[in-house]
Image (tube, grey):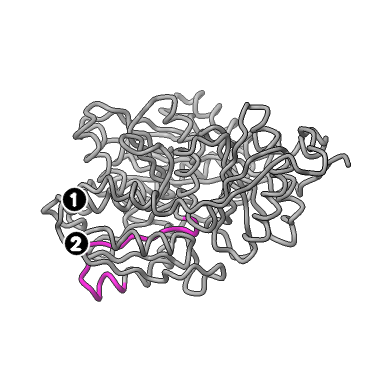
Amino acid sequence: MAFAHTFDPTVLREYDIRGIVGKTLHGADAFAIGRCFGTVVARNGGTVVAVGYDGRLSSPALEAELVAGLKASGMEVVRIGLGPTPMLYYASTVLKTGGAIMLTGSHNPPDYNGFKMMLAGKPFFGEQIRKIGSMAAAGDVVAEAPGGKGGSDRSIDISEDYITRLVQDWDGGDRNLKVVWDNGNGAAGDVLVRLVKRLPGTHTVLFPEIDGKFPNHHPDPTVPKNLEALVAEVARQGADLGIAFDGDADRIGVVDDSGTMMFGDQLLVVLARDVLKKHPGANIIADVKASQVLFDEIARAGGKPEMWRTGHSLIKARMAETGCPLAGEMSGHIFFNDIWYGFDDALYAGVRLLGIQARSSEKLSSVRAALPQVVNTPELRFNCDDHRKFEVITEVAARLRAAGATMSDIDGVRVNTADGWWLLRASNTQAVLVARCEAKSDEGLERLKHALVAQLEASGLEAPDFSGENAGH
């Protein structure tokens, strides 16, 4: 029987396929993804696809449909079962599979789910994901073997190998740090509980049970409200630091010993200083939303800061091009490529951070407080039509060039002035524009906000209310 399938247009995102289960995402979609991605792998010369899934209630059923689609395309499917996304990346890397698919809704609400993919060890995103949609609609897939017996599947438990590899890079000696971890009922739970038993120190894991309903708090460590339990436990224990994960543990959040949240760019300063000791002069990549403090501190530590486009797939692709040893995003994606494999792994980033702290005589709060102080807005998001959002960026960039502004257009526009900088970019995943401002003073921040508002109004947009939107950093 000929295969053809049409996806809800909202599920084909820039970096993954994601939707609301039962509304925009169904079992038939999972089968179609397997059928088309298996075809892509086959045409790329591959025969094996690794598959993992997170703790969401819908994940087991969707995984079964996904595997059926892959087998129908002749794939040998290696099923690693329930666990964090980076464990799937690890499996694909060490087993050298032709492809990999992680079934996860990441930090989205419980009724969401989705698919993150790798092809031959590289990110699978953008136009490649859109091609899955056109292939499905056209029925452009490899022929199914007679009787549907073209592929096979086998289950393996790679978790012990993965944990052993995480521990292998521990470099903090035997100092007994006191650490609180917040799993947030996410997919890392079982692996995390076993990991901390292999590390020196005293470790407490909050909400280790994997529960797709996320009964304690939403699993997004970039939102301060979601870190309240972690902050309280760090204070109660007088711990050295706290570490939190998102739902599939490819993003990390950190609070220092004072219970203060460290932003992704502040964390990257700490990690970059350490990596540059062994890789002097190396490139360190950060996304366009990061503080100027980060880029300055990388240079001060002897590195070459590189500003790049926001998006974990885009960062990973750039890392592969440049061979840089470390990269990170404001969102908490951290990529080690020195003695690790270049993919984003919050468990691994946690191990490396603890090693740095164990070797340091300075409290993490002191390291954070010693950074140059700036004032900034949080990430500001406001609605803008999917087509119009890119037109606005083009218009703003043209006006700024004509005015002789100092700017980067690597991802939207980031404008430098004597006060600091402001950013306006189009989201790759939603019908929104994203803005951010950072200055050396409150007065400077207000001037940057006014400059941003003026550009929005010049493009006919009603400017958002930025009053009170100061994060401090």
Name of the residue lying farthest toward the left:
361
Neighbour tally class for label 2: few under 14, some 14-19, many 20 plus, Cα within 10 Å: some
Query: In the image, is residue 37 above or below residue 107?
Result: above
Neighbour tally class for label 1: few under 14, some 14-19, many 20 plus, Cα within 10 Å: many
Q: Nearer the viewer, residue 430 or 67?
A: 67
* Whole-percent x, y for residue 156 in the image: 52, 51
- Marks 1 and 2 in Cβ contact (< 8 Å): yes
* Whole-percent x, y for residue 462 in the image: 61, 49
Of pointers 1 and 2, the one earlier in the residue sequence: 1
Query: In the image, is residue 374 above or below residue 299?
Result: below
The answer to whether 397 appears left or right of 284 in the picture is right
Question: Which residue is at a point 43% across and 38% down the rendered structure image?
Answer: 288
Count of marks overlaid on the render: 2
Residue range of the region highlighted in magenta in the rendering: 232-248
In the picture, residue 427 is in which quadrant?
Answer: top right
* Whole-percent x, y for residue 83 in the image: 49, 57
Label 1 SS: loop
The answer to whether 396 appears left or right of 244 in the picture is right
Magenta span contains residue 235: yes
Label 2 SS: loop
Q: Nearer the viewer, residue 364 or 384?
A: 364
In this figure, which residue is indicated by the disc labeled 1?
A: 172
Question: Which residue is at a point 53% across and 58% down the rendered structure image?
Answer: 82
Q: Nearer the viewer, residue 80 or 123?
A: 80
Label number found at residue 177: 2
Whether residue 273 is visible here, answered yes or no, is yes
Question: Which residue is at a point 49% across and 60% down the rendered structure image?
Answer: 187
Magenta span contains residue 30: no
* Whole-percent x, y for residue 440 in the image: 29, 45
